[in-house]
Structures are given as C-alpha cells and as structure tokens.
Image (tube, helix red, strand yellow):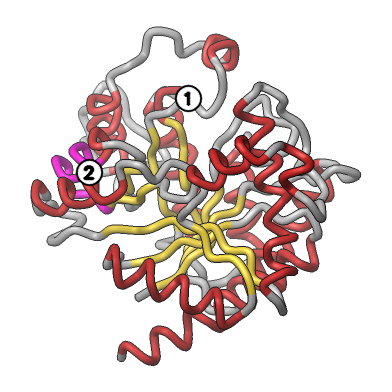
Amino acid sequence: MKYSLLDLAPVPEGSDAAQAMRNTTELAQRAEALGYHRYWMAEHHNMPGIASAATSVLIGHVAGVTRSMRVGAGGIMLPNHAPLAIAEQFGTLATLYGDRIDLGLGRAPGGDQAVYQALRRVGSDDFVGDVAELQGYLGAPVPHATVRALPGEGTHVPLWILGSSLYGAQVAAHFGLPYAFASHFAPDALEQAVAVYRQQFQPSAQLDKPQFMLAVNVFAAETDAEGAYLRTSMQQAFARMRTGQRGKLPRPVADIDAEIGEAVRRGVDQALRVTAVGSRETVRAQLAGLIARHQPDELILTGQIHDHAARLRSFEIAAEVMQALILESA
C-alpha cells in the first residue's frame, strides 16, 4: 500500500499566502524524504485560508523543488475550466517534469456561484464530456485534428476521478480510471460509492483493475491530548465554512465546545469522522482500522494544522506509522 499527502496550502491566522507557499515548499521536500508517494494540491477559490487557487502553478513549483515524488492535482475542478486549457497546463507540467504528474478531476466548483460566474464557466455541466475531451487532448497525437493541445498530446498524463457520491464512482468506473473518494470531509456515501466503483469498473488503456484511494485527516502528535488540540483548528474552520464565515485557519483552542458549541462540534465531527487523531499508537490503531474496513489501494493523508512545525511533525509520525503498517502486511 502506498501513502500520499494532500496539501491545501493553508493560510493560518497571523500569517499570509506567501508564508503558506513557503510552508508548502518545506512540507513537500520533507514528504519526499519521508516516502510519500504523491503530493497533491487542491483547487479552491475565494477562500482566505487556502492558497492553492492557481493549482497548476503551485504544482509546477512543488515539482521543481522535489525530485522523484509524484506531484499533481487532487483535484482540478473541471467544470471551472475549458478542457483544452487544462490539457495545455498539465501537458506543460508533464513536458517539464516527465512521468511524475497526476491530474485528479472533480465535478464540484471549488467555490460559490459568484466564483463560478467569475470564472466564465456558467452553463458548463457536461463532466463526462469534458473528461472525454481532456483524455483526447492528452492521448496519442492526431496530426490533422482541428484543435490540439500543444504541449499536451502524447503525454498521457494519468487521470483520476475525485468524488464524494455515486456519480463520481460511476464516472471513474465507466472510463476505467482510478478513483479517489473525498472521505476526509464528506464520507456519507463512502462504502456504497466504493462498492459501485469496484463492481462497475471497465478496464482501460490506463488501468486494468480498480484502484481506490481513501482520504484521511491526520492529527498526530506526541500525546492524544496534543493531537486533539491540533485538530481544533480544522474543527473551527469547518464550522465557520458551514455558516459562510470563511477566513484563515484558526488558532487551536483548549475547549472546542466552548468555541463553536457542542451541537455544532458533533455535526462537524460527523463530517470529519474519517480521521486519525492522537499519539503514534492511537493514530496507528485508527489508520489500521480504516484500512481493514475499506481495503484501499492507497491512503492520501491531509490535515489542517495551524502551527507549521506541528504539521510537519504530524505528517512525519503518520509516515512512520504507515511504514510500520506496510511492513506488517508484507
């Protein structure tokens, strides 16, 4: 089993986007040294706490400061973009960095309706058609085609489908593509979607059998109490996002219920329940349980932690835990 990392380039309270990007640089280099297989970045817009809006630009930067780790999008929200533009962007990345680039595709807008209008993609809702068009641009060259992705054609950048519903599972199965489920914030349809994906999968030129990635939040620390404390930043951010109060990643608090209320916290924890939080031993047990239950081919770990040093340490502990679990299962 492989383990990977999803980074949203969080902007903590008291900091700015420039520092967030410097943090991403350090985290990516550390992740490569820790054996993370992929380093993915996600497209979000109009969010003060996330600095990865220009996702392909940041992916290029990360690929440039690493050597062998796969780097890519988890994901690009395809309804926001013309498939040709994405083919050219990721074709350029693949031309620069070779077979290290992944392109995960999502159907959500990655922002509100105002963002969707500002991106000039109003009325574009043919996700399946857009995926097929994008595949064509990145596939074998067609010299007499009216429109070609240059660079892009012939790069065969591996595509992934991202989702949190049965629809994404069906699309991934239909195209014979690997499937990453957004279990780290929307796990309700997880088991059913993975079952549908595996049952309906059609082999393709890219993939001969289903490949499922499970997304997990990780807040690892020296003690259970410290892990729970680090987690309160993401709990607050998620609670605020649900009420339209977008801002930078909050500082952790000692009493999360006093901050957002017990009822809200229960709702947030339900949405974020695919999470491993606590000491090394606790995180190990929780990750082992998730692996046993869902049988993923790969885990992608994420975690919105305010303090950069604590975030680095969390992913370090998580990597050590994953290495131990992989050795056990060998």
Residues in magenta, as a range: 169-178
Q: Nearer the viewer, residue 322 or 294?
A: 294
The residue labelled by disc 1 is 109
For the point 57% across and 71% down, the residue is 67
- Tell me residue 86's x, y (percent): 44, 34
Residue at disc 1, secondary structure: loop
Q: Quadrant of residue 212?
A: bottom left
Amino acid on which the number 1 mark rests in the picture? Pro
283 on left or right of 304: left
Q: Which residue is mark 2?
A: 172
Asked if the residues shown at circle 2 and circle 1 are in contact, with their CB atoms under 8 angstroms apart, the answer is no
- Left or right relative to 36: residue 191: left
User: Dot 1 surroundings within 10 Å: few (below 14), some, or many (20 or more)?
Assistant: many
Residue 209: image location, x then y, percent: 14, 61
Q: Secondary structure at mark 2?
A: helix
Q: Amino acid at mark 2?
A: Ala
In the image, residue 117 lies in the stretch drawn in magenta: no
Q: Main secondary structure of the magenta part?
A: helix
In the image, 194 versus 151, the foreground residue is 194
Q: Nearer the viewer, residue 303 or 148?
A: 303
One can see residue 323 in this view: yes
Report the residue at 23% width, 28% height from top: 128
Q: Position of residue 192 (x, y in %)?
A: 21, 46
- Check the image and report above or below for 82 versus 223: above
CA–CA distance in space, label 2 to label 1: 18 Å
Q: Quarter-wise, where is residue 145 in the image?
A: top left
Judge whether 271 appears above or below 312 on screen.
above
Left or right side of 260 for 199: left
In this rendering, the answer to whether 170 lies above or below 61 is above
Q: Residues within 10 Å of mark 2 (few under 14, many from 20)?
A: many
